[in-house]
Image (spheres, rainbow, N blue to C red):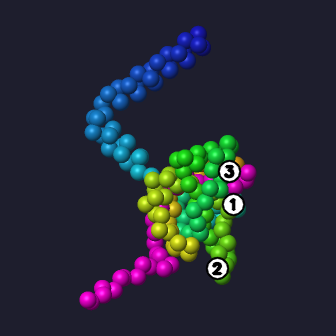
Amino acid sequence: MKKISIILALVISLGTGAIVYSQTSPSAISSQIAANSAVQYNQVNALDVVASPFKYLHRNILIRAKFDKFSTLGLDYPPAMRKSDKYISILIQRPDTPNHNIPLSEMKIFLKKELAEKNINLDAGDEIEIKGRVFSTALGDTWIDADDLKVITKKNPPKKEEKVLE
């Protein structure tokens, strides 16, 4: 008798859900999906992320930092696999040493090669903004897939070429 009442309650609850779903217009459903698909990034301090990588695992983060260099650090490492034929990694400078250019090597940031090629003119010290997702904490480090990289300020802006009068 108890099994029958549980099954009956389950059937009723599933039936009610189907009725509610069938009464929802397709446009209302698509607008709800669009609202949920907007990715939100939380601005964080790079040193906080490195200090507690597990706290940020599977979270979307935004980091403002100084670019250090393109690298191959962390590529093709099996526990956090990003293949070197599709990705390049970048290093940012440690924010706690402003007078020296020391990379924050505990943070592995991966860019798809197409995104890296758009930003090939980056120089050490350029201020950048990285939007990405922490996908692994292998070796106790932070491993980030970058969704976007934006240059905020250039350390050495390009000089305008002077026209030579002949």
Spatial CA distance of label 1 from label 2 is: 17 Å
| Contact, mark 2 vs mark 3 (Cβ under 8 Å) | no
Furthest residue to the top? 1
Residue 4, quarter of the rendered image = top right
Q: How dense is the environment of label 2, judged by Cα within 10 Å: few (below 14), some, or many (20 and up)?
A: few
- State the residue at coordinates (53%, 16%): 7
Mark earlier in primary sequence (1, 2):
2
Q: Does dot 1 land on a helix, a strand or a loop?
A: loop
| Contact, mark 1 vs mark 3 (Cβ under 8 Å) | no
In the image, residue 20 lies at what x, y percent? 35, 30
Furthest residue to the bottom? 165
- State the residue at coordinates (46%, 63%): 119
In the image, residue 76 lies at what x, y percent? 64, 46
The residue carrying mark 1 is 106
The residue carrying mark 2 is 98
Q: How dense is the environment of label 3, judged by Cα within 10 Å: few (below 14), some, or many (20 and up)?
A: many
Q: Magenta stretch?
A: 139-166
Mark earlier in primary sequence (2, 3):
2
- State the residue at coordinates (33%, 38%): 29
Q: How dense is the environment of label 1, judged by Cα within 10 Å: few (below 14), some, or many (20 and up)?
A: some
Residue type beneath disc 1: Glu
Residue 7 higher or lower than 50, as above or below: above
Spatial CA distance of label 1 from label 3 is: 10 Å
Q: Is residue 152 left or right of residue 79?
A: left
In front of the other: 73 or 1: 73
The residue carrying mark 3 is 137
In the image, residue 57 lies at what x, y percent? 62, 50
Residue type beneath disc 3: Thr
In front of the other: 110 or 18: 110
> Which quadrant of the rendered structure holds the C terminus?
bottom left
